Amino acid sequence: MKIQIIKLSLLIFCISGFVRGESVPTPLDSPEPVESTPKVIPKESKEAAEELDGLTQSLYGAGQLQQLAMGARFDTAFLTGSGLIQGFTLPSARLTVFGDLSLHVKYRFSLGQTREFSTVLLPQILPVEAFVDFSTRPLFRNESGLVVRMGMFTPDFHPLWTPDLSYLTLPTYHESHRTLFLGRELGLQVKYHSSNDQFEAGLAFVNGVGILSENSNNAKALALFVKHGFEFGSAEFKMGLSAFGRLQSSKGSLNFRQDWLALAWASMRLRSIELWAEYYLGEFEDSAVRNEPNGSAFMISVEVSPTISLWGRYETLGGSPSGATGIMDRWEVGPRFQLHSNLQLFSTYSQIDEGFGLGAIQEFRVQLRLNI
């Protein structure tokens, strides 16, 4: 009886399926898995997208714009010897905000200490950089172009007179540079870069009075510089010529000042050894006195290991505008330790005779630099 009922049910099911136009599954009709149909991209669109992507990469590289970034650096040191400053000190500190507004425009703003780049003893925290760069060369692209800088900056007429000590592997700037060079200024600079950055040339038109006072005496200064680098075998050479002139008020007035300085420098790096030499001369005149400074500087650095280097420098300056009656001689030696990618330790011994007839001043310095 049960078998007949089952047969009758199957017959009714088959008839109903036939009436609805549906196929009746059988045990042999096992359903196949449903696969998603891949999206078909027209060949022309795909080629156009690849061509556009390749063009973008070739033009601008793989970098990305960074509209707001921050950096900080400070140096803390301990000094002992016969120098004027002894004990613990903070010789340098800086807080920087920078970024890219577009592929052709970037900016930088920094707060720092004045004694970092000048001869003042008491430090003042104030803006030391505030400029905007307009470039004909897009970011991330290696090609020649012009960069126009406007605002507060240090003219680029000497590689060691950089606006930030974090770019250098030196504890301090040269004394002769701090005495003679144009410091932080307000003005305009135009610089040309070659495609590989091996050649640079430019000029800067600035107030010429620094950033510690307003330009109330009709001061003006012009700086010119040119730099070229090349490789010869395993050695890398760089050399440059720089000059600046400065005029303030008219001759005969109490605030009259007229200065000029010219210098030449050259460097060579061969494997773990780096050598540097420079020579400068000029004329500094004001309403009371005229000086004709001239001098030179030499440096050597030897990389003992990836974390340890030995370095030394010697500089001499005669006819200093600071009022020294003789010739300033200074030499400094010591090791440099790269404790971390953002942390350096300097341990140096220096001896300086400032030419005032007081004899040589000896100083031992341990200095820690954090740069992030």
Image (cartoon, rainbow, N blue to C red):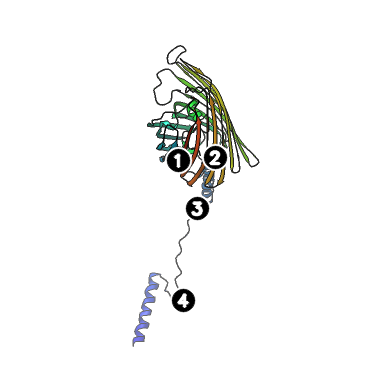
Q: Residues within 10 Å of mark 3 (few under 14, many from 20)?
A: few
Q: Residue at x 47, y 43 (%)?
A: 345
Q: Residue at x 52, y 50 (%)?
A: 46
Point out which mark residue 28 bears. Answer: 4
Measure how far apart labels 4 and 3 are at the Cα level. Answer: 37 Å
Report which residue position mark 1 lands on.
367
Q: Quadrant of the N terminus?
A: bottom left
Mark in the foreground, 2 or 4 = 2
Among all residues in the image, which is located at the extreme top? 252
The answer to which of marks 2 and 4 sits earlier in the sequence is 4
Mark in the foreground, 4 or 3 = 3
| Local secondary structure at mark 1 | strand
Q: Residues within 10 Å of mark 1 (few under 14, many from 20)?
A: many
| Whether residue 238 can be seen here | yes
311 relative to 251, above or below: below
Among all residues in the image, which is located at the extreme bottom? 1
The spot of residue 242 in percent (x, y) is 55, 27
Point out which mark residue 311 bears. Answer: 2
